[in-house]
Amino acid sequence: MTVTTGVTCTTKHFVNDKTIKNSVHRILIGTTNPDKLKEVREILHDLPVELIGPEKFSPLPEVVEDGQTFRENAAKKAVEWARSTGQWTVADDSGLEVDALGGEPGVTSARYAGKDATYNDNNLKLLKALERLPMEQRTARFCCAIALAKPDGLIFVVEGQCAGLIAKESKGEHGFGYDPVFYLPEYDKTFAELGPEIKNQISHRTHALRKFRKKFLTLTDTGQ
């Protein structure tokens, strides 16, 4: 059986009806995950605004991620954190969808093996669930939604995906989350083996943030 898969990434977006006229000089990266914070900073390093971390407003109020989609959760986090901090806020919700598991772990990716699960706990549970399946039946995709909000409400949401396969064992020392088990046939490596230089050119988060950057610069007068 031949499987056609790999680094295929797509984006889609939602924008509200408001036209943004004012200049924005700084944006809060709304995340409580230090790995995501580092990756967003690296990918948006050339955005012509100051990117501030959550430590300036620590602790950020907890947001219950009860949405049915990545977009819903990203929007909720961005709106609530923008309102509580008074800052324009970009927030992310992302995860892994595995076809053989009906799209799981999906929006529960971070807590797939339990509320306090580690990255390794989640990966081990995933590998166990797929252990009898051949590679051609291990198709999956990383999904990422990026939302931008200002204190009085949501501005827009963009989404990106990156397709691949679930490896039969964890490999690699880079990255975080499911990176050690997310295999890209074109590179014959997992995300964790590729390292940030390549991952940050092709990942689901990269494609969503590129869309974010383009739309943000279009809606504000910070464009170059």
Image (tube, helix red, strand yellow):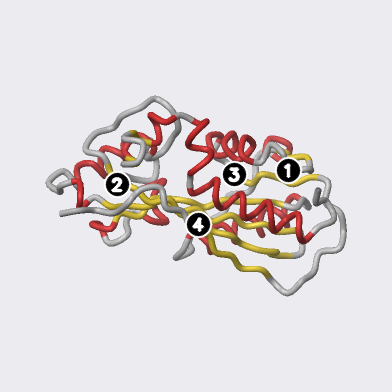
Residue in view at x 44 percent, y 65 percent = 68
Expressed as whole percent of the image width and height from the top left, the position of residue 89 reads 70, 51
Residue 85 as seen in the image, left or right of residue 197:
right
What residue sits right under mark 1 in the picture? 47
Q: Where, quadrant-wise, is the N terminus in this rendering?
A: bottom left
What residue sits right under mark 2 in the picture? 165
Judge by depth and name the residue closer to the eye, 7 or 191.
7
Q: Alpha-carbon distance for marks 4 and 2?
A: 26 Å
Q: Is residue 19 visible?
A: yes
Residue 31 as seen in the image, left or right of residue 55:
left
Q: Earlier in the sequence, mark 1 or mark 2?
A: 1
Query: Which mark lies nearer to you, 4 or 2?
Result: 2
Q: Are marks 3 and 1 in contact (CB under 8 Å)?
A: no
Q: Alpha-carbon distance for marks 2 and 3?
A: 27 Å
Direction right: furthest residue: 22
Q: Earlier in the sequence, mark 4 or mark 2?
A: 4
Q: Alpha-carbon distance for marks 3 and 4?
A: 12 Å
Residue 104 as seen in the image, left or right of residue 160:
left
Expressed as whole percent of the image width and height from the top left, the position of residue 106 reads 38, 56
Look at label 1 and name its amino acid: Leu
What residue sits right under mark 4 in the picture? 65
Look at label 3 and name its amino acid: Thr
Q: Are marks 2 and 3 in contact (CB under 8 Å)?
A: no
Secondary-structure class at tag 3: loop
Q: Earlier in the sequence, mark 2 or mark 3?
A: 3
State the mark number for residue 31: 3
Q: Is residue 129 visible?
A: no
Look at label 2 and name its amino acid: Leu
